[in-house]
Amino acid sequence: MTQAHSGAGPGAVVEFRGVVKEFAGHRALAGFDLTLRAGEFVALLGPSGSGKTTALRVLAGLESTDAGSILLNGADVSRLPASRRDMGMVFQAYSLFPHLSAGENVEFGLRMRKVSPEERRSRARAALALVELDAHHDRYAHQLSGGQQQRVALARALVTQPRVLLLDEPLSALDARVRVQLREEIRRIQTDLGITTLFVTHDQDEALAVADRVAVMRAGSIEQIGTPEDLYARPVSPFVADFVGLNNRVAGVVRHGFAQVHGTALPLVDPSQADGGVQVFVRPEDVEFAAAGVAGVVTSSSFLGSLRRTGVRLEDGTTLVTQHSVRLNPALGARVHLAFTGAPVTVETSPRLGE
Amino acid sequence: MSAGLRSGGVAHAPARGIRIAILGVIGLLFAVPIVAMVEFTLRKGLGGGHDFSRWITLFQSGFTGQYRPLLVAAGNSVALAIGTVLIVLLLLVPTMILIQLRFPRLRRPMEVICILPVSIPAIVLVVGLAPVYSMVARLFGSGVWTLTFAYGVTVLPYAYRAIQSNLDAVDARTLSEAARSLGAGWGTVLLRVLLPGLRRGILAGAFISVAVVLGEFTIASLLNRVNLQTALVVVSKSDPYTAVIVSLLALAFAFLLLLTIGRLGAARTRSPRPRSLSKGLS
């Protein structure tokens, strides 16, 4: 498979331009713009109903567009039927053809392309080897585990050397362990083949772990797109801050481009923020124990393997969560002091601040 | 029949003793009239005693002479059965798949429409059909085959249930989308992907349709068409023994047919057993 691919160039450039899609009055995509560079792995992240699956299905040709265009290497494909878009797709639901063996499933796309039987067989074997399932060539879907079925589906999607790989929450039906394993594998194969990939998920860990860039979607358009690091460290809006990673929400005041929280001035991700009362989003890892600072009482603490997360109730009644080394193990009820590390924060102008 | 239509969900089997008792009672219930029929055909006139003379006479005659109408009528019934199956295959199956894939909102109305005929007595149906058939006769002539249209309606509930239960068990939408993304056109999706998965339901629906058509009397009789059942009634007036013999043969044929459905349901080792998954996509 890798061999077969060495001749093919890198993946295609995909461009969404102002794509609009409505379902019975509901706007699933509201002028959706996105460009995927050749060979790039982009994750669409968002809550259900944000339009991420619709964006993927529109690209696949499984849904039509109401307005806007979709370009593949500069050519408009928005009127092309799904069968002629040359994209590999892996679905959330198990989608292997039940009457065909794993090998025959993988061969299906090649059969559609009228590839000779010998070549078909050898390419199918190579594709199954790529997902480490060459020994399961003759098994049927019901003889395979969920993870194996999704791997065969991946091999089936890749064997035709499509211009784009589309992944529609392919891991969400699997258990946690297999999920992590398979996402690493998808990433490895994607990097090896250099295929442009669009990955839809509602799981932020998944998106941050594998993608080159993550696009956070809200109400049919992209709220923010950037590298996982970018998105995590500098969320442009409360929505993104809230959706990506865990957050403390604390009351604060913006003054002169800094957020004042419990006596500490924190830099803002967006310094143009107007002065006034706000809700400040602070990451648990940006709060630490200190000799002096905000005083509070430990109310909870959970061991997470490589780190520990502890909740501290402050005197004003709010709770701050801090993430710290497992070497520290504060007792419940202990009086501690917390300090902010000073990492830039995102704020939300909140009407509730008068309270 | 139930064996053929069972769609994978295996309930707890009752204990062996209870199973035998239930089967025994039901078997006895069905056996009594059949055994009585067989006994009737073996009677030796007024003298008493039993033999196979009537069976032998019938088979030796090769269904010629006075028995000829029965053969013609059986032919009619078989032709009607084939026509009805064609309606199921060419009209009902594609419609159901189309609704499943493209118009899921029409599923409820479709179900109601398809189940409706079972709740309408055949005699009532004929009252409605009579004027329709005066028009059908003008358009297509008064051939026996035109009854297919009426039979297409009467078998709807049975065929629909058989096919729908299979359709529910396969995720037709995802499978067809997967096939399309792999480069398959709609024809290929239907023939290569969906029909193989629906084979069991479609066969069961077809066989049940055949069984229903072979046993149909009311509509054919009231619309003055000849099929196996109406011919049997005519023959039974002059020769009740032969009528019963042919009834038994028809019964055996239908039994074989249903046995085949049962086997199809049980013997498929490759049976698709999709793990149930959230069908709705986010």
Image (cartoon, coloured by chain):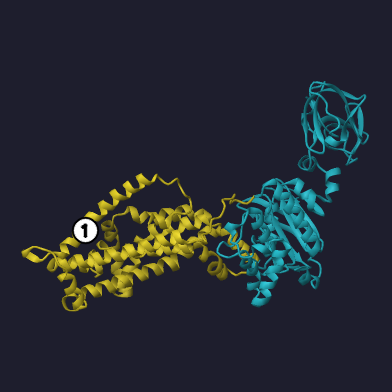
Chain colours: A cyan, B yellow
Instruction: Report the side of B147 relative to A298 (left or right).
Output: left
Residue A60 lies in quadrant? bottom right
Instruction: Report the side of A169 relative to B145 (left or right).
Output: right
Residue B243 percent coordinates (x, y)? 19, 67
Residue A95 lies in quadrant? bottom right
Instruction: Report the side of B71 relative to B5 (left or right).
Output: left
Instruction: Report the side of B186 relative to B229 (left or right).
Output: right
What SS does tag 1 mark? helix
Pointer 1: residues within 10 angstroms few (<14), some, or many (20+)?
Answer: few
Which of the pair B20/B107 is nearer the observer? B20
Residue A233 percent coordinates (x, y)? 86, 43
Which of the pair B203/B137 is nearer the observer? B203
Q: Farthest left residue? A: B47
Q: Is residue A262 above or below residue B271?
A: above
Residue A2 percent coordinates (x, y)? 78, 68
Say what amino acid the circle numbered 1 marks: Val
What chain letter is assigned to the residue under label 1?
Answer: B
